[in-house]
Structures are given as C-alpha cells and as structure tokens.
Amino acid sequence: MNDILQKYKQDLAIKGYSKKTQTTYFGCVKKFLGSAGKPSDTLDKSDIKSHLYRILESPKCSCSTMNQTYSAIKYFFQQTLGRPWEIENVPRVKKQYTLPHVFTQDEVFSIIKGARSLKHKAMFMLAYASGLRVSEIVSLKPEHIKSDKMRIRIEQGKGHRDRYTILSEMCLKYLREYWRAYKPVEWFFEGYGRGKRLSIRACEHAFDKAKRIAGIQAIAKRGIHTLRHSFATHFLEAGGGIFQLQKFLGHKHIKTTLVYAHMQEEKTIARSPLDVYGKPGIF
C-alpha cells in the first residue's frame, strides 16, 4: 500500500494542487485504502460506495468532507490506478446554501482595538480593510504593498491566481507604523526568529485573544476569516461594485461573490427608481 500511496503523492504534486489540497487528498485516500483492506487493483465501485456511506453516517460528517473524499478517490482511480471512473451515478453530496457569518462594524473595530500588539493590530486591520485570507496575510512581502497605486499584490492566492486588492489609507498609516517598529526582512509579518514567516495558527490564536478581550460572543464559525466576509459585505453596503469586489476577493466566478449581494439585500429597503429620482410635480 505504501508504494501506491507514494505514487499518488507524486501524482498530486505533478498536478499542481496546493500543499493543503495535497495533504487533504492524500489523507482521504489513505483512509479509503485502510477501510477497504484489500489490494488497490481489486478495488471496485462497491468499495467506494461503502466508504462514502461510512463517512456519511459519521456524526462529524460534512458535505465538504464528503466532496473532498469523492474528488480524492476519483483522482486516485483515474490518475494513479489508470482506471475509469465508474460511479458517475453516485452523486456528490449537495452543498448546503448558507450565508457567511459577518461582524458588525463596531465588532470589527473592537477586535482591532483588542489586539495585544501593533503587529496583530496591523494584521487584523489589513484582513478587514483589504479582504485578505489568513494564508495571504502570512505570505505577504514588503514589496507587495503598492502605496503609490493604493493596491496590494497577492501572489499565488487560492487557485494559484495573482491579483490586486484595495489598500486602505487608514490601514497604510498603521502598516507604516508597524514597519518602522518591527523592520521585517523577507515576510511582512514575521514569526519567532528573524526572517521566518508567521504561522497561520499564530494569527488565529492572536485573533481569538483579541476577540475575547473585545467581549465578542464566541461563535465557532466567526474566526479571523470572518474579517474577509465582513470586508465584502461592508464594501457593498458602502456603495462598492460587485465586479470590483470579485476582483478584490480573487473569485473566479461571480456566483461566489453574489452571496454578499444577497446579504446586503437583507438590510436594504427596496425603493422604486421613480421614487428615488422623481420629483414632486415633474409630470
């Protein structure tokens, strides 16, 4: 089994999947082979269905876990084993449509104020002001801050795509203050040790502390990534365009961005354009 797993690991790397996806897919297939308990060349449709059903019956099952497992096993069969994918009649789990959690403006400001250091304050402000993912925050380099164009360059974000996002004037002021105090070398936000990149876990831990200091109610799904959701929602509420937002967030499909438009509609009082632009006596 080790030989076939090693081959699968190589196939994932050659495909160009991100490190995170490679680790996830590898773990899914390793569990599948372990639960099947038989040589890979004897695996068939019934083994796949049985494994997916076991996951579905697990109390910790999510549609994300199911679909990741489905995709991982499919790539394993087609690429590593060189066999046809014969279970097209087994549907993926239908993803539940849920609106992302967001902070109010006051909650965001309270969290930023609750940061224990200038570094953490700059990180949280940047996540909210520019809509960055935590992985993009820790990958940021000094040269990515384009203050002359008021943009931030994101290199190889999710989906291996480069993009530019907006840079806030207020945030730039704090980034400069942070720069003067910390003088980072390679990574804009360094961890322990000169020139070492800050870990994602350290960011999340610092955010959880700031949230507790701010007295924000503990909700499991309101982590540091919620600052990105809050940026998107508040950007539209402030009059920003949906296509601008798509570019700033780095979404490949506008459908992904439109979820924030739906959230905005919840707070918007619908008015006819005739009532908005028409004047008494105009007719």
Image (cartoon, helix red, strand yellow):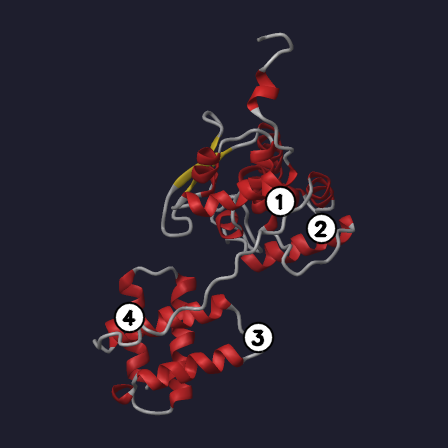
Write down the residue under mark 1: 124
Q: Residues within 10 Å of mark 3 (few under 14, many from 20)?
A: few
Nearest the eye: 172 or 278: 278
92 lies left or right of 175: left
Q: Please report whichever mark, 2 or 1, sits nearer to the chain's N-terminal start.
A: 1
Q: Secondary structure at mark 1?
A: helix
Q: Is residue 278 above or below residue 3?
A: above
- Residue located 38% across and 59% down the image: 18
Under mark 4, the amino acid is Gln
**Residue ID for mark 4:** 10
Graded by Cα atoms within 10 Å as few (under 14), some (14 to 19) or many (20 or more), the crowding at tag 4 reads few
x, y (%) of residue 99?
A: 58, 52
Q: Which residue is mark 2?
A: 210
> Pointer 3: what residue?
60
Q: Tag 3, which secondary structure?
A: loop
Residue 249's spot in the image, x, y percent?
47, 42
Question: Mark 2 or 3 closer to N-term?
Answer: 3
Rounded to the nearest whole Å, what is the CA distance between mark 1 and mark 4?
Answer: 37 Å
Q: Mark 3 near mark 1, Cβ–Cβ under 8 Å? A: no
Amino acid type, label 3: Lys
Q: What is the CA distance from the residue labelled 4 to the residue labelled 2?
A: 41 Å
Q: Earlier in the sequence, mark 3 or mark 4?
A: 4
